[in-house]
Amino acid sequence: VVFHFGTQTPSDWNEQRWPRLVLIHAAPIPADAGRSFNFNKLRAMLLARVRSGIVLDSDQFVAPGADALFQRTEQEITQDYAMPILPAHFLDRSPWDTGAFWARYCPSEDDCRWQTTRWGHAHPTWTHWALPWIGRWLRRNFRDEVLPPLKDGAMPALRVTDVPEDEDLFNIATWEEGGTKQWCKYDLPGPSDFDSLLAAKPGSRKCPGCSDVAGDSRWYPNGVPRAFFTAHHAVDPEETEYYINAIKDKQKKGPLPPPILYRGEFFATGLEMKAKYPDIQCII
């Protein structure tokens, strides 16, 4: 499902070339509304009317095995946990990055007691159970609502339009509602991250010298696991074509390594990884 928020679509976005494409046209947020274009992402999640979904940006490509995320999404986002889940960001953002919203969740720069997850990247997954959450937070932005003070004033009021981007809103809304779930890094920062997968020896689960996404002192002191499901920042067509073809060629020669990589070892499932590293906080 591809959303087009614009005036004219490329002529090659057609059923002859892409027979499975569902192309949905929608008017973008008006330029004079004072809202980031990126809030169209939340609109797309509502308008898609899917039972479960994964948000991808236009500069991402998808690797074999990514469909496993749909089942995992349906297992994790339920009536009892009815909000989207973000993957961990490769940056550990904090009040040092500035932003008016930090004061509500961090009484001081070193005390973020009401931040309930590491900063997440705006590539969420969701199910139909999360649709009210998405609509609620998009409404709060569009209506210029104010979150009232909480914790006897220790959490100051926050004007929702002071949360300038979709990624900021996804994060503070997760913290505001006590969300604790976060995906391991399945949206790898760039195509070259797939070098680790491509260099793996057939039949081996070891990846000597392979690194994890940079950790932090609170959530992931030993780094964030990577899952080879998608690559972000695929903005160079020639580079993207190279990696897609390289993945295809490696797959033709035999099964790809298991998709999850942590501490120099490939794992087939998040449960398998969790059995060896029970303290890891992300899910996959």
Image (spheres, rainbow, N blue to C red):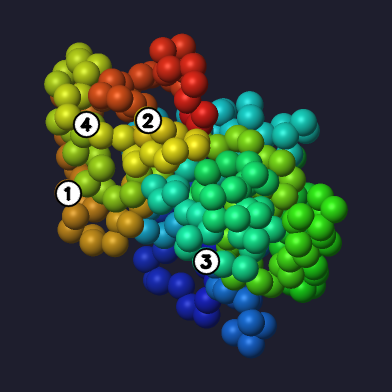
Q: Amino acid at mark 3?
A: Thr
Residue 32 at x, y percent in the picture: 64, 87
The part of the image, by quadrant, that contains residue 243 is: top left
Residue at image mark 4: 210
Q: Amino acid at mark 2?
A: Asn
Position above or below: 141 against 57: below
Q: Which SS class for mark 1?
A: helix
Position above or below: 118 against 26: above
**Residue 35, visible in the rendered structure:** yes
Q: Which mark sits nearer the N-terminus, 2 or 1?
A: 2
Q: Which SS class for mark 4?
A: loop
Q: Amino acid at mark 1?
A: Tyr
Horizontal relation, residue 186 to residue 86: left or right = left
Residue 94 at x, y percent in the picture: 50, 55
**Viewer-nearest of discs 4 and 1:** 4
The label shown at residue 98 is: 3
Residue 193 at x, y percent in the picture: 25, 42
Horizontal relation, residue 161 to residue 85: left or right = right
Position above or below: 140 against 220: below
Q: Which mark sits nearer the N-terminus, 2 or 3?
A: 3
Residue at image mark 1: 242
